[in-house]
Amino acid sequence: MSNSLPHDHITPFKDSEKGKKEQVADMFDKIAPKYDAMNRVLSARTDIGWRKKAINMLKKDSPKHMLDVATGTADMAILTCKMLDPEKIDGIDISEGMLELGRKKIEKEQLTHKIELHTGDSETINFADNTFDAVMVAFGVRNFENLEKGLAEMKRVLKPRGRLIVLEFSKPRRKLIKRILQPVHGHCGSAGGSLVQTE
């Protein structure tokens, strides 16, 4: 059984009796129609650049089959398709409201033959071991109910020598940037990407 981490107890609504997973799903179902616009505003559109940098970290590997965890409205999956042209991207998310919007965006981009979205949980990924050449999660690990389980599941579905890319907010180190971003992001401001390779 995995250990509980401090991350696991941070929830959207402190007074709710629901678990973190249910709270996150409810929250994103409610904000889904405004989510993309909020993302652009809160990051001052820098989230697009961060996504591109993260995707470029996978470029030299030319992954064919990819998994986008916490795919939301499929921003990362769509951008990855355009930049890397993999054969297939599967995206999973616990919010059906976000997935519904994602499917509309995929259809508009004429990428339905490449990207497929599924209702799915990061802690119980419904794919076999060693399925994907690469797994990515952008701005999603903070919403995992159990971080250790989520990371273990992503590793499980990666092929040997596969790559995991995690893009997430972090605390800005420079005082000036911190001062500028603090009113908007609270304790979050800049973003960082990590690349992990399975053995």
Image (cartoon, rainbow, N blue to C red):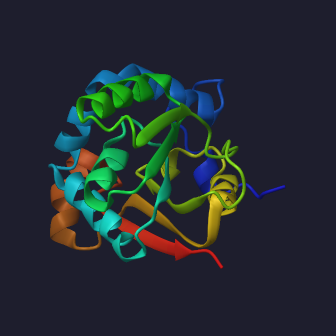
Residue 141 falls left or right of residue 8:
left
Q: Nearer the viewer, residue 168 or 159?
A: 159
Give the answer, above or below, for where 163 lies relative to 115: below
- Of the 4 image quadrants, the one containing the N terminus is bottom right
Count up the numbered dots.
0
Counting from the top left corner in percent of width and height, residue 193 is at 38, 68
53 or 103: nearer the eye? 103
Tell me residue 191's x, y (percent). 32, 62
Q: Residue at x 32, y 25 (%)?
A: 104
Q: Quadrant of residue 106?
A: top left
Please provide percent x and percent y for residue 59: 34, 71
Left or right: 58, with 135 as reference point:
left
Q: Which residue is painted at 24% across and 53% down in the image?
A: 47
Q: Position of residue 126 (x, y in %)?
A: 68, 42
Task: Name the residue rendered at 18%, 55% in the picture.
Answer: 46
26, 112: nearer the viewer: 112
Q: Residue furthest right?
A: 1
Q: Tell me: residue 177, above or below residue 182.
A: below
Horizontal side, residue 123 vs residue 184: left or right: right
Check the picture and name the quadrant holding the C terminus.
Answer: bottom right
Question: Which residue corresponds to the image point at 66% horizontal and 24% vertical from the top-left?
Answer: 17
Vertical side of 157 occupied by 33: above or below = above
Q: Is residue 125 above or below residue 7?
A: above
